[in-house]
Amino acid sequence: MFSIPKKDAITFLLFALVVLTMPIWLSPFGASYPGLLQKFAIYALLAVGYNILFGLTGYLSFGHAAFLGVGSYAAVWSFKLLSMNPILALACAMIFSGIFALAIGYVSLRRSGIYFSILTLAFAQMSYKLAYSVLSPITHGENGLQLTLQDPRTIDLMFMERGVSLPTSSLFGIPMNGYEGFYFCAVILLIGFFIAQKIASSPFGMMLKGIKSNEDRMNYTGFNTKPYMLTAFVISGMYAGIAGGLLAVTDPLAGAERMQWTASGELVLMTILGGVGTLVGPVIGAWIIKYFENIFSAWNESILHNFFAFLPDNIEGFVVLISSKFVGEGWHLTLGSMFVLVVVFLPGGIMEGVRRISSWFLRRKDPTKDQEVVDPENMPKPSSEKGE
Amino acid sequence: MVESSHNTVLHVADVHKTFGGLHALADVDLAFEEGTTHAIIGPNGAGKSTLLNVIVGKLPPTRGTVVLDGEVLTGKSPYEINQMGIARVFQTPEIFPELSVFDNVMAPAFAKRDGAFSMNLFKSIESEKDIAREAEEIIVDFGLDAMIHTHAGALSRGHKRRLELAMCLIQKPRILLLDEPTAGMSRHDTNTTIELLKKIKSSGMTKVIIEHDMHVVFSLADEVSVLAQGRIIAEGTPDEVRGDPKVQEAYLGGTYE
Ligand SMILES: Nc1ncnc2c1ncn2[C@@H]1O[C@H](COP(=O)(O)OP(=O)(O)OP(=O)(O)O)[C@@H](O)[C@H]1O
Ligand SMILES: [Mg+2]
């Protein structure tokens, strides 16, 4: 069960190395503080799970933020009612988001294409609105769901006295904020990545790719595609739920804004930006978007002045004026332009760019290696056949 | 004449199919005998593909039923019908363009072995040695080994058809439905395909073949039914059908000889 093909094993080891050393290599980018590192790991997990649905089957869900929200609420309730243990909270998040995904998926998967997307969007928006109204006893509406000093926390309080301040989530005494929290998220991300790799290289994953490629053919080949789709939907919903749970673990509160459609849209952007259907692409997409959202958006003119200080004064002023429109509040402009450029010139996302560059290097090294296999039937017919 | 020693494996019983006012199939009653190759010929728009669509569950008949070995197929889903042993090659090849030739052939083998749904999430495809060997063998048999790792979408039309045939045959179906398997092929490719089909003829599989090319029909078929405007207008051995003046008028006159 734990054996994976050699190529996947190498990918996994490299990925693990990159993730675990994030606090080091992100510091020159000003992005190595725990809060952001946690987000990098959490949203990467979300993207990896989303890719199991969108990347492998081609079904575009526009409602995955709902599962993120359900996961957060479930985790906070687990803190409030049971224990501050993060594992327990994630188990709750996984179970509840799984049930939720089963129900939404069961209905939405009666349609495909754009109708499927619209159905998932409708369910997610409904959950978002209900969280503010009818469901506010559970979600605490606009205030968000928070810990209080009066929470029952039955399991915890069997073993310890109620403290005077609000507790934080901790795993056997290790607090889940700060760098420890990041490493906890990173380990969950690596487990999630490993499972996604296993799925992609299993017969089940092959069937999902078959559905994306030609769903009719799958039916005439003897596959009942519905349960395949539903399983993929529930699995990716659970990934989102666990990601939502991690958001609560690192910062124990949950609000409905996590379920808004913009959050689902962001997830679609991450996946497309990085490369749909690749394992690593969506992760890169997630990191880029979170970096922009958190770091780039905080850049202001004085940072730009420092950055361009090597230029002569009058040019510097001009360059800063132009580039200031792209940072700070204008970060959406940069992200938007980047997205357009990627979609137009690299439809396979950033991963396609990486592939193109690496194949270019390989070709330069070994010119014989990259020769296309020529299919004789695709060639223009030689004239000798005319004689028939 | 239909030999009485054979027994009917697939029975299309009084099937009627209308599209709006158009009678695509009218009172079609056909019995396909076990182990034979049964050709269905007829002019464009005669209803040949519609007949196959009704058999595989793509279209519900307006009236009538399709029966496989005493079990009614009408109303079942395409995947159930395939699981009961019917595989189909389409008029325009239906393959998985984004998957490799190898995966295209592996997938149907999984459907045959594991059924319509199986949750083998954590088993690696690489550990499926038996299915891989089977797929490789059939790919070699079909002369597709040079492109085994190519995306199927990049194949030539002739190779796509051959691939689709391989995808059907790896399932060892009881009944193989072929919708113009040689259309648009060069004479050379057509002959290769005829040889392939002749080879599997000995394996006892029942084949239903729709074909425009009379050369193919006469080299393969044991039985011929002629469809014109949704009706069966003649049935018999290739020689009998060839001599039938009604058929000459409806169809053969222009195309053959
Ligand atoms: N899904 C459909 N909806 C409406 N009309 C259809 C449909 N499928 C087929 N038809 C019509 O039914 C008639 C029979 O079509 P069919 O495709 O079965 O003919 P065919 O014998 O296979 O012809 P060809 O040799 O051109 O493949 C045609 O007039 C066609 O336009
Ligand atoms: Mg046809």
Image: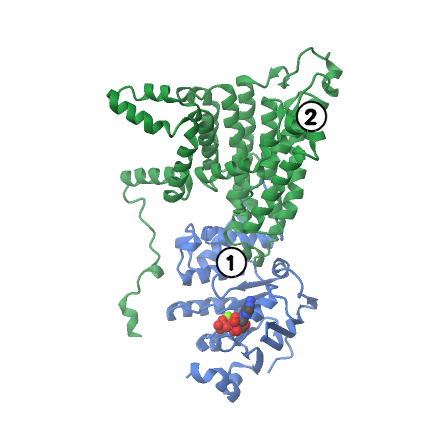
Chain colours: A green, B blue
Q: Residues within 10 Å of mark 2 (few under 14, many from 20)?
A: many
> Mark 2: which secondary structure?
helix
Q: Residue, x 66% and y 21% (percent of image)?
A: A85
Q: Quadrant of residue A46?
A: top right
Choose mark 2 or mark 1, whichever is in front.
Answer: 2
- Taking the image as shown, residue A145 lies to the left or right of residue A14, namely right
Kindly state the secondary structure of the residue where label 1 is placed. Answer: helix
Going by the picture, which residue comes out furthest to the left? A312
Q: Is mark 1 within 8 Å of ligand 2?
A: no
Tag on residue A224? none
Mark 1 belongs to chain: B
Say left or right for B227 vs A298. Answer: right
Hey, which quadrant is residue A234 in on the image? top right
Of A235 and B158, nearer the camera is A235
Counting from the top left corner in percent of width and height, residue A360 is at 31, 40
Task: Please tell me in which quadrant of the rendered image residue A351 appears.
Answer: top left
Q: Residues within 10 Å of mark 1 (few under 14, many from 20)?
A: many
Position above or below: A228 against A172: below
Report how many numbered discs are placed on residues in the image.
2
Q: Is mark 2 within 8 Å of ligand 1?
A: no
Q: Which subunit holds the residue at mark 2?
A: A
Residue B117, position as x, y percentages in the image: 63, 50
Position of A139 relative to A363 (above/below): above
Question: Considering depth in this image, is A88 or B82 the residue closer to the camera?
Answer: A88
Q: Which residue is mark 2?
A: A78
- Whether residues under marks 2 and 1 lie with C-beta atoms below 8 angstroms apart, the answer is no
Q: Which mark is residue B167?
A: 1
Q: Residue drawn 41% across and 38% down?
A: A339
* Amino acid carrying mark 2 in the image: Ser
Residue at left offset 44%, top offset 57% = B140
| Image quarter of the N terminus of chain A | top right
Amino acid under disc 1: Met
